[in-house]
Image (tube, helix red, strand yellow):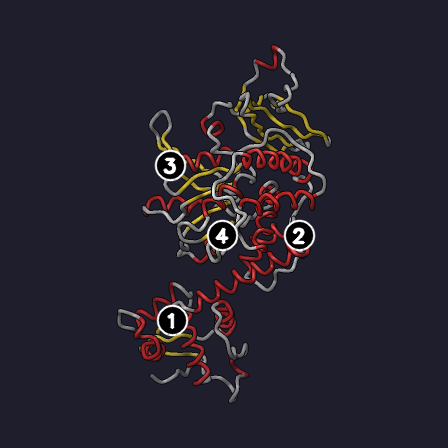
Amino acid sequence: MPNPESKSSAQQEKRPATPAVSGCFSDGTIMELVYHPEEPATAFALWRDGRWSIERDYGLPSGERLIPFSPNNNVIKNDVVVLPSRPVEYGTKSELVADLRRFLHRYLDVSPAFETIAAHYVLFTWVYDAFNEVPYVRFQGDFGTGKTRALLVVGSLCYKGFFASGASTVSPLFHILDAFRGTLILDEADFRFSDEKTEIVKILNNGNVRGVPVLRTMINRHREFNPQAFQVFGPKVVAMRGSYDDRALESRFLTEVMGNAALRGDIPINLPSRMREEALALRNKLLLFRFRNRNTIQVNGALDLDSVAPRISQILTPLLSIIEDPTAKDALRAAATSADEMLVAERGLSSEAQLLEIIKELSGEAHKFVLPIGGIADRFGSRFGHEYERPITPRWVGGILRRRLHLAPYKSHGRFVLSLDPLRLNALYERYGITGATLALDPWKSEGGEGDLGTTLPI
């Protein structure tokens, strides 16, 4: 590492010193922590006025002096968080992406489409803080399918990649994510204990949108409870065997299923020592990419992801905004469509979808816009009752309508009925993949003359 430029004076050395990792300042300066393990030494790589330099501290206008984390910090010296050592020229953006793909292909066996997506996701992690939403990447499969290898290879290139596992205690995860603001690389993300699962799911649920910290209760030196907000926003790369029950969380992942084919013959069974050196060389190139692009890149709202659910479009548009290669754009759009179709299919197997199917069927038969809950429960029980280990009652059906579908039955003439709101129900039919004719938007112009909102389907 070059000798840091000396800016110190007796007056400067007396200024308050605060350990820091990185920062983007209002004058366009970008500051990043760099680490050279052979010395060992840490310093700041600074980007100002189109040029970079290595310096040992950075003074703020307030008089505060920022200093780099110590090279003896356990997180740094044990490669829990991987860092670059200095900026290095990378050529063009397409040349850098090609270098990333070659590295991934050399050590990782994934589909060509996902190899392309993973290379651009690595690039995205280095400028993710220019956006307000981020997607996650997941490697899914049984043991022995290469999930951990995928994390090691992809994670070694990501911006401030922070390696952890589901066996880790949760407190360090919150503190390191809050301090380093990098990429969480999480192995064994299925979790064995409910408490761990709850805490990590908080990170995953809150970490894909800026400005949604996780609050945790801390105790100060006076033994007073002092809630603290931990910033967990940032890219995540996880490996797990199964899926999460929360469909909203599932929609955040770009998933590659591992182990569907025999391992390529050119993939080394054991990672060679040169892999670490190659990864460091690429991180150095990626650092210069961040310097040149962080302050100018922005989300492109004109990109075409209208064919998928708004949530999927929201989190994938930032990633799509950094992609220039048409083939890579097509691969990401295909992944978005596949994820959207899978979510719709999963919804279609749920109790809510079955209930909507019955409602749509009954409303079409009766040509009415009010249905009795008892009639819905009877038809539901005869069609799907054998799939449930409990009796299908009007009370149970009403609970699903209220709590899961947010449709409110009401009491009319001594029995509970459901008013069929065409706008709301047609949106639910589309969301849950219920096909067929939809309800007329104007119930008074439905087939057969004026609809009678006060008449219900007989039980």
For the residues labelled 1 and 3, the Cα–Cα distance comes to 40 Å
In this figure, which residue is indicated by the disc labeled 4?
Answer: 263
Label 2 sits on what residue type?
Asn
For marks 2 and 1 on the same chain, the one whose residue lies earlier in the sequence: 2
Judged from the image, the secondary structure of the residue bearing numbered disc 3 is strand
Label 1 sits on what residue type?
Pro
- Proximity of marks 4 and 3: CB atoms separated by less than 8 Å: no
Residue 448 horizontal/vertical position (percent):
51, 89
Task: Specify the quadrant of the image occupied by residue 42.
Answer: top right
For marks 4 and 1 on the same chain, the one whose residue lies earlier in the sequence: 4
In this figure, which residue is indicated by the disc labeled 3?
Answer: 217
Residue 365 horizontal/vertical position (percent):
44, 85
In this figure, which residue is indicated by the disc labeled 2?
Answer: 300
Above/below status of 87 relative to 188: above
Residue 419 horizontal/vertical position (percent):
43, 75
Label 4 sits on what residue type?
Leu
For the residues labelled 2 and 4, the Cα–Cα distance comes to 38 Å
- Proximity of marks 4 and 1: CB atoms separated by less than 8 Å: no
Task: Specify the quadrant of the image occupied by residue 337.
Answer: bottom right
Judged from the image, the secondary structure of the residue bearing numbered disc 4 is loop
For marks 1 and 3 on the same chain, the one whose residue lies earlier in the sequence: 3
In this figure, which residue is indicated by the disc labeled 1?
Answer: 409
Task: Specify the quadrant of the image occupied by residue 380.
Answer: bottom left
For the residues labelled 2 and 1, the Cα–Cα distance comes to 42 Å
Identity of the residue drawn at 56% across and 13% down = 14
Q: Residue furthest left?
A: 390
Label 3 sits on what residue type?
Thr
Judged from the image, the secondary structure of the residue bearing numbered disc 1 is loop
